[in-house]
Image (cartoon, rainbow, N blue to C red):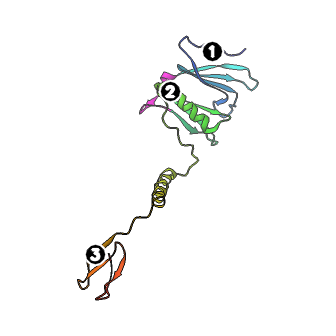
Amino acid sequence: MAAKYNLQPNEVVLLKDESVMHGGFWSAYTDELMLTNLNLVLFKKGMFGNSKGVLTFPVNQIKVYNQQAQAVIGKATNGTDLLEVYFLNGQEKFAFQSGGKKKLNEWIAKIHQAVTGEEAPAQQSTGMALPGAEMVAGVLKDTLGVFKSKLGTKPEAPVKVAGKCRGCGAPVTGIQGQTITCEYCSSAQQL
């Protein structure tokens, strides 16, 4: 006999996945997880598809901090990425057999939307980049932008300048930034 869950008149399905693992060491990817605008619903199944019941977690019981629903990517003891959802009275962990962090971020975004009614913030890091890589990429982008702007335009016309020799006070002329030698005292100086 299959477990049933009847949607309430004001309830809609937002996301649903099969091959979900929930529970401890002996659990397997046999469950189904469904997110509605009102509940997170887990259909517990046995190894042979037999129903073991339905667990319902109201989304209005999910903790919120800084306007963000507390659904995050966590790690199991074996290193598997999983979805951790923090409720007012505890936490639940769900692992998906396929989809990786992309699927986890999709669930996090939908849970955030169901809890807060707002679009989800930027996705969590995929963990693929090294720490600080985003900052380095920004600096490199800015540096390349400077090179492009300098290489993409005509070179600036040289600026002629006139002044006095620092050694003897004689008049000197040349291009700004250039090193010249005074005709009178032979001292070198930059204009």
**How far apart are the two marked residues, 3 and 2, measured between alpha carbons?**
68 Å
Q: Residue at x 63, y 30 (%)?
A: 23
Whichever of callouts 3 and 2 sits on the residue coming sooner in the sequence is 2
Q: Residues within 10 Å of mark 1 (few under 14, many from 20)?
A: few
Residue at mark 3: 162
Who comes first in sequence, dot 3 or dot 1? 1
What residue is shown at x 50% (from left), y 27% (from top)? 113
The quarter of the picture where the C terminus appears is bottom left
Vertical placement of residue 75 versus 108, above or below: below
Residue depicted at 69% across the width and 31% down the height: 29
Specify few, some or many for label 2: CA neighbours under 10 Å numbering under 14, 14-19, or 20 or more: some
Q: Is residue 89 visible?
A: no
Residue type pointed to by label 1: Tyr
Q: Would residue 68 be counted in the magenta stretch?
A: yes
In the shown orientation, is residue 48 left or right of residue 21? Answer: right
Residue at disc 1, secondary structure: loop
Residue 142 versus residue 86: which sits nearer the camera? 142
Location of mark 1 (residue): 5
The alpha-carbon separation of the residues under discs 1 and 2 comes to: 22 Å
Q: Which residues are magenta?
A: 59-70
